[in-house]
Image (cartoon, rainbow, N blue to C red):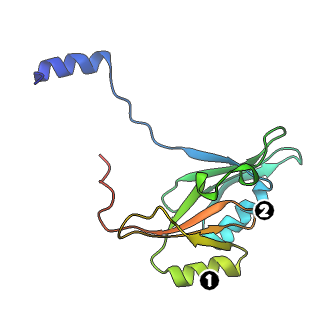
Amino acid sequence: MALPIVDAILASFCPMRRFHIEHIGIAVSDPEAMGRWYKEVLGFDIRLAGGDGEKSVSFVSDANRCMVELFRIPGVEPVAPILSHHLQIHLALESDDFESDGKWLEANGARFIEKCPTALPGDFLLVYHDPWGNCLQLARRNPGRFTPPT
């Protein structure tokens, strides 16, 4: 067992840094149209959007301000068509009403894929593709599934 003074000395040489996710970026085919769909259908905020015809970007965020960058740049292929499985990259959305939320997504161009095969007991996950083929999940987790952040 380390002594508090030893811990303090070690921490001064190797301080732990705590980072926060600023955004997650995904190469897509039409960032501006996707940004508008994510705003209109998912209720996200568009934080930044623009392009010059060759390059384009939309930063969208949820109410918790977690941002997703949807971008297109020359030489970088959109990821959705080249994935070997739709769950390799997905955006999970909390849902308390799967029937209503699923109907809403489908009425707005999303396509149901499957009930997620990796759901843990007590969790319920449905998988969809947005109109551009990117994977979305509707997720309801077993209460207490995750440990609280420290």
Q: Where is residue 108 in the image (x, y as percent from the top left)?
A: 71, 77
Going by the picture, which residue comes out furthest to the right? 53
Q: Which of 97 and 38 is in front in this view?
A: 97
**Left or right: 94, with 58 as reference point:** left
| Comes first in the chain, label 2 or label 1 | 2
C-alpha separation, residue under disc 2 versus residue under disc 1: 21 Å
Q: Which amino acid, by three-letter code, is at mark 2?
A: Ala
Say left or right for 73 vs 108: right
In front of the other: 17 or 79: 79
Nearest the viewer among 117 and 57 is 117
Viewer-proximal residue among 21 and 141: 141
- Left or right of 65: which side holds 29? right
Kindly identify the residue that appears in the image at 67 percent across and 79 percent down. Answer: 106
Looking at the rendered image, the disc whose residue lies closer to the viewer, 2 or 1, is: 1
- Place residue 114 in its image quadrant: bottom right
* 16 in relation to 100, above or below: above
Circle 1 residue: 103
Tell me: residue 143, above or below residue 48: below
Residue 80: image x %, image y %? 72, 54
